[in-house]
């Protein structure tokens, strides 16, 4: 899953020793992926839009 600006990416991975039960974890992996957040990047100090 990429960040909004595309500068960062997160990967959620789950492994199980029993591949037959793998599909039962699909919902949990989707919930984990949905919980990922990226911190706001600091403002660009070179930007002319900074209030002084």
Image: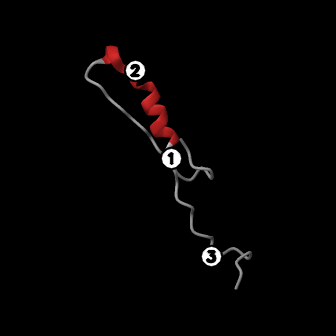
- The picture places residue 51, in percent across and down from the top left corner, at 71, 81
Q: What element carries label 3?
A: loop
The disc label shown at residue 45, or none: 3
Compared to residue 2, the image places residue 52 above or below, namely below
Circle 1 sits in a helix, a strand or a loop, which is it?
loop
Seen in the picture, residue 51 relative to 36 is either above or below; the reply is below
Q: In this view, does 52 lie to the left or right of 34?
A: right
Q: How far apart are marks 2 and 1 (CA)?
A: 25 Å
Q: Which of pointers 2 and 3 indicates the residue nearer the eye?
A: 2
- Mark in the foreground, 2 or 1: 2
Q: Do the residues labelled 3 and 1 touch (CB within 8 Å)?
A: no
Q: Dot 1 corresponds to which residue?
A: 9
| Residue farthest to the bottom, as pictured | 52
Look at the image and tell me in which quarter the C terminus lies.
bottom right
Q: Residue furthest left?
A: 17
Image quadrant where residue 45 sits: bottom right
Residue depicted at x 43% and y 31%: 28
In the rendered image, residue 29, in percent from the top left (x then y), is placed at: 44, 32
The numbered dot on residue 34 is none
Q: How far apart are marks 2 and 3 (CA)?
A: 47 Å
Residue 36 falls left or right of residue 5: left
Locate residue 24: give its quadrant.
top left
Instruction: Identify the residue at image location x=62%, y=70%.
Output: 43
Dot 2 corresponds to which residue? Answer: 24
């Amino acid at each position: 899953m990429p960040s909004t600006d595309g500068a960062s990416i997160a990967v959620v991975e789950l492994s199980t020793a029993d591949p037959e039960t793998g599909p039962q974890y699909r919902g949990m992996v989707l919930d984990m992926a949905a919980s990922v957040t990226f911190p706001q990047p600091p403002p660009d100090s070179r930007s002319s839009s900074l209030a002084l």
